[in-house]
Amino acid sequence: MDAAIVHEEMSTPRALRALVIAQLAAWIALAPAHRQIFGGRAGWAPAWDLYAELGLDLVRARFYVVRGDAREELDRYAALGFHDPRLAPRWLRTLRGETGALRVARELCKRVGDGAVIQVDAQIATRRGWSPIFADAVDLCRPQPPRALPPERRRGR
C-alpha cells in the first residue's frame, strides 16, 4: 500500500474530537495560571480552595484551676495522667471546636475534684483569624448554655 493512501485526511468527527480534547487540555493547564500567576478573578476560572478549611475549628487553649483566690495554670496532659504529650489521645492533643475544649474541661473537672473551678483562655481558628471562645464562662465544670455560631464559623457556603 502506498503511504498516501494510509494517511487519509482527518474526517470531520475525528477533527472535532481532537479539537475538543485540545481545548480541554488547554483549560486544565491554563485556567489555574489565570488566577495563581496573573492574579485574575473571573467566574470562568474557579478558585482553588483545596486546603482553605484545613485548620478551621482548631482550638488553642490554656486551662486554669481556681481554688479560693488563687488561679494557677493547669497542664492538661499531666493532670490527665500523660507525662508525654505524644502519648496522649488525639482528642486531648488536638482540640477541635468548642466541644473538644469542653470535653477536656469535663475530664479535668473529674480529676481535679469537687470545689475546684476550671476556667479556660481559648481561641478558635476562623477564616478571619483567631476568635476568643468561652470569654464569658466562669466555671466550665458547670453545664454551659448552648451558643449560637457567629456567621464566620458556619460551615459550607
Image: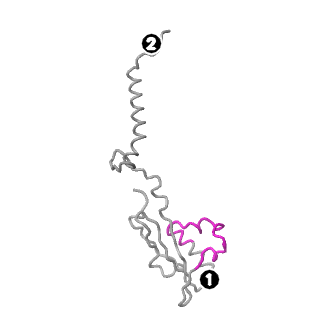
Question: In the visual, does 45 lie left or right of 54?
Answer: left
Is 80 part of what is drawn in magenta? yes
Residue 151's tag is: none
Residue range highlighted in magenta? 74-103
The answer to which quarter of the image holds residue 132 is bottom left
- Residue located 63% across and 69% down the image: 85
**Residue underneath mark 1:** 113
Give the image quarter of residue 117. Answer: bottom right
Q: Of callouts 1 and 2, which one flags the residue occurring earlier in the amino acid sequence?
A: 2
| Percent x, y of residue 3 | 47, 12
Q: Main secondary structure of the magenta part?
A: helix
Residue 75 horizontal/vertical position (percent): 60, 77
- Closer to the camera: disc 1 or disc 2? 2
Residue placed farthest to the bottom in the image?
69
Q: Residues within 10 Å of mark 2 (few under 14, many from 20)?
A: few
Residue 151 lies in what quarter of the image?
bottom left
Q: Which residue is mark 2?
A: 4
Q: Position of residue 69 (x, y in %)?
A: 53, 90
SS at mark 1 in the image = loop
